Image (cartoon, coloured by chain):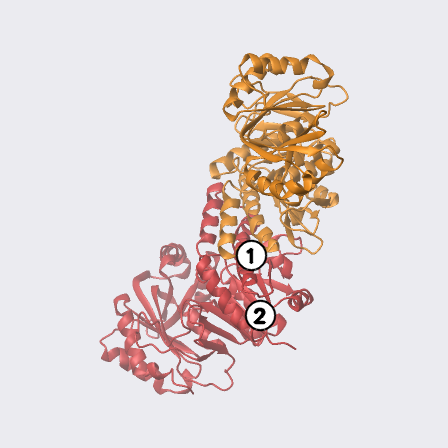
Chain colours: A orange, B red
Amino acid sequence: MTEIKVLKFGGTSVGNVGRIRHVAGVVADACAHGKVIVVVSAMGGTTDYLTRLARQCSKTPRKRELDLLLSTGEQVSIALTAMTLSDLGIEAKSLTGQQVGIFTESKHTNARIVEIKEDVLRKHLADNDALIVAGFQGVNAAGDVTTLGRGGSDTTAVALAAQIKAIECDIYTDVDGIYTADPRIVPDAALLDRVSYNEVLEMARLGAKVIHSRAVELARVYSVNLRIRNTFKPDHQGTLITGGDMEIFRSISAVAVDKNQAAIAIMNVPDQPGIAGKVARALADESIGLDMIMQSFHPTSGHNSITFTVHEEALDDTIRVMNSLKTELGASDVQTDSDCAKVSLIGAGLMEQPDIPARLFDALGQAGINIKLISSSEVKISCIVNREDAVAAAQAIHKAFELEKLDQPR
Amino acid sequence: MTEIKVLKFGGTSVGNVGRIRHVAGVVADACAHGKVIVVVSAMGGTTDYLTRLARQCSKTPRKRELDLLLSTGEQVSIALTAMTLSDLGIEAKSLTGQQVGIFTESKHTNARIVEIKEDVLRKHLADNDALIVAGFQGVNAAGDVTTLGRGGSDTTAVALAAQIKAIECDIYTDVDGIYTADPRIVPDAALLDRVSYNEVLEMARLGAKVIHSRAVELARVYSVNLRIRNTFKPDHQGTLITGGDMEIFRSISAVAVDKNQAAIAIMNVPDQPGIAGKVARALADESIGLDMIMQSFHPTSGHNSITFTVHEEALDDTIRVMNSLKTELGASDVQTDSDCAKVSLIGAGLMEQPDIPARLFDALGQAGINIKLISSSEVKISCIVNREDAVAAAQAIHKAFELEKLDQPR
C-alpha cells in the first residue's frame, strides 16, 4: 500500500496567493514520496471578517447559518490550493467536509466528528496525487454544514490521519516546533525534536499555544504521529509528538508561562465536607473555568481556607459568585489578588525525582522571586508569582534545569 | 395549497449589510401572503474578487476548482440573508445548490440544470416560511459543485419557480422594469407594465440588458410569470413578462440600441451555393458570433456581395478569418466599417402592419440620419447607422411611434 501522509496548513500559511504558492511547493515535494492529504484553514483574517458580517446582520446569528457562512472560508482556500497544485503538474482535487464525508454531531459551531467515510476518502485518493480537504467543517445527518469549533482544522487533520492510518500528520505553522519555553520569554529555549502527547497536553493547559489540546487528545487515542513544523522552513524536521508514556524519555521537558491569572481566597470556612464542591459547582454554573485549587486546614481554629485561581478576565464574575456564596459557606471573608502569573515546569517523569521541586523553589528563591501559591501533579509543578516576576521566573527555572541542552539528540 | 412565490435578488441588491437588511424586509412582507423561495446572488464584487484570486493562483484554473471557489459567494449571501430574516421573526433556512437538490450537467462553469428535486424542496418548504437558495450553482452526479454561467441566478430562480409551480417569479434589480427604450438614451421612455417572452428575448438579443435571455427562454417553456421590479421601490409593480404571442397585445413595444457593432463586406464573390455557409462556418469555428447577415446579388456581373455585422471587439479576429478565406471564396475584396451602431424597433405584431417599416425609415430620414444596413424579422427591424447617430435615431423612432404613451393601462 502506498504511504499516505496528512499535511495541515493554518490560516497564516495560506494568508495570500504568494503563500498559497509556497504551500503548493511544499505539498508537491511531499507528493514525490506518496499520496498526500492536505488540510487547509481559511485564509488568515477571513473567519473574523465573516463573523463580523454576521454580527452586523444579526445580534445572535442562527448557528446553522453561521456555520454555512464560516465554512466558505476553507472552501476558498481548498479551491485556490488545488488549482495552484494543478499548475505544478500535481493531480489535486479539493473536497469540502461534506464531499469527503466528514460526519459530525448535529449541533452547530462546536460539533464533534462522528465518522469519516473511509471508502469515499480512498476512492478520491486512488484517482489523485493529493486531496485538498477543507478543515474545521463537516456535515451532519440532516445534510447541514457544521463547524468543529476551536482547533477545528487541526482536529480535521488528525481525524483524517487516524481514519486512513497515515504514517504521519504534519501540522505546518509559523513556528519551528515545540520549545522548552516560549523563545520570546526565554531566548535560549531549545527546540524539542520529540515530545509525548501528555507533555504537550500539559503545555497547552498551562498556557503554551502551538496546537489545540483537542487535536492532541485525538492523536493520542488513535496513536497518530503528529509533527509540528514551520511552513516557511520545510527542511526543518520540527517536533514529533508521539507516544512515550511507557518509556519516559525525558524527566523535564519545558517551562510554560501564563500571565493572566488571578487568585481568590475564601477565608475561614468551617471544616466540613462539601465546601470545595460547592465552590466548584458555583463556578461551573457560571461557566468559569477553575484552574488551580488548594485547601489549607488550620487545626487550632477548626477552620479551612480555600484558595483557587481563575483566568484574569473571569475575576469580576468570580468575585460576584463568591460573595453571593459567602453566607452559605459560613466564610469570614473573600480575598482576591489580581496580580498573578503562573510559571510551570513540565515533565513526564517529574515526580519520580524528589529533588526537582527543591531545585525549582531554590532557583526562584535565588532569583529573589516570591512564590504565592504552589500546585503540582504527576507531570507538572506550577507556581503563582507576581506578574512582573513571570519572565525572570521562567528564565531562572529554564537555566536551573539546563533546558537549553534538550535539543541534543537522544 | 399555499401560494408560493419566488423572489430573486441580484448582487447589487445584497451588496452590503444595510441592503441585505432591506431585502429581508421585502421578503418578510412577501411572507405575509404565502411561502417564499428567495434566490440570491453573491454580494456585488465578490465574484470578480474571487476570479482575480484564482487567476493569481493559476493562469488556467481548473474549472472544477473555480466552480467550488465561486460558489462560496452565494453561500455567504444566503447565510447572511437567512440570519437577518430570522431576526425579523421569519422562519428562514439557507440552502446551497447541493442542499436544495439542483442537479446539473457534469461540465463546469457553464452547466445547465438537469433536474430539481421537488420532494426535497417541498420538505424544506413545509418547515419554513422562506427558503434562501444560492443562485448560480448546482451539483453534478459526481457530487461536485457546478456553476451555471452567465445569467445563472436568474435561471436558478425561474427553474425553481417552474419546478414548484410558483404563481410568480419576481426578479428584483436596480431598475424599475422594462422600458420602451433605455431611459438614459430616450428620456421619455415609458415603463411597460406587461411584455411577452418573445419581445423580451428580442430586446435582449438587440442589446437591452435587464434579464438574461436564458432565464426568459426557460420561463417561456414552463410558462413562468416573470416580474422585473426595483428592489428599492418594493411598492412598484414593475414589468410582468408573460405569454401573449397568441393574443398580440401590442404591435410595437420598444426601441433598442447596441452601439458596439462593426460591419464587414465580402465583395464580388461568385453567385454559387454555399458561400454564405462557408463564411458562417469559418466564423463559428473561431467562436465569433454573427449578428446580421445580408447577401445582395448583382445580376449584370453574376457576382454577390455578402455583408454581415459582428460585435466590435470581434472585428480584428473577423478580418483575419475573412482574409484567409478570401481566395477560397473567390472574393475581390474584404471591406470593413467599424463605425456602426444598431438601432432596432421591436414588436410582436410589427410585420403585420406594412406602414411600420415606412414610418421607421421616414423618421430616420427626417432626422437626417443615414441608414447603412437594414435587417428585419417577424418581431424587429434593425438599422445600422453611424455610432454618433445612434441616440438621435433611437429618439426619432421612439417619438415617431409615440412609445412614451405605452405606459397607459391596456
Looking at the picture, does residue A409 appear above or below residue B89?
above
Q: Quadrant of the C terminus of chain A?
A: top right
Where is residue B185 drawn, in percent x and y?
30, 70
Q: Quadrant of residue A235?
A: top right
Q: For this view, does A45 lie left or right of residue A115? A: left
- Which residue is drawn at the image coordinates 31% and 61% (left, top)? B336
In this figure, which residue is indicated by the disc labeled 1? Answer: B79
Check disc 2 and give the amino acid type: Val
Q: For this view, does B363 lie left or right of residue A288? A: left
The crowding category of the residue bearing disc 1, from other C-alpha atoms within 10 Å (few below 14, some 14 to 19, many at least 20), is many
- In the image as oriented, which residue stretches furthest toward the front? A301
- Looking at the rendered structure, the secondary structure element under dot 1 is helix
Where is residue B145 drawn, in percent x and y?
60, 53
In this figure, which residue is indicated by the disc labeled 2? Answer: B36
Q: Which of the two residues, A152 or B68, is positioned nearer the viewer here?
A: A152
Where is residue A297 drawn, in percent x and y?
70, 27
Residue A410 appears in the picture as rendered: no
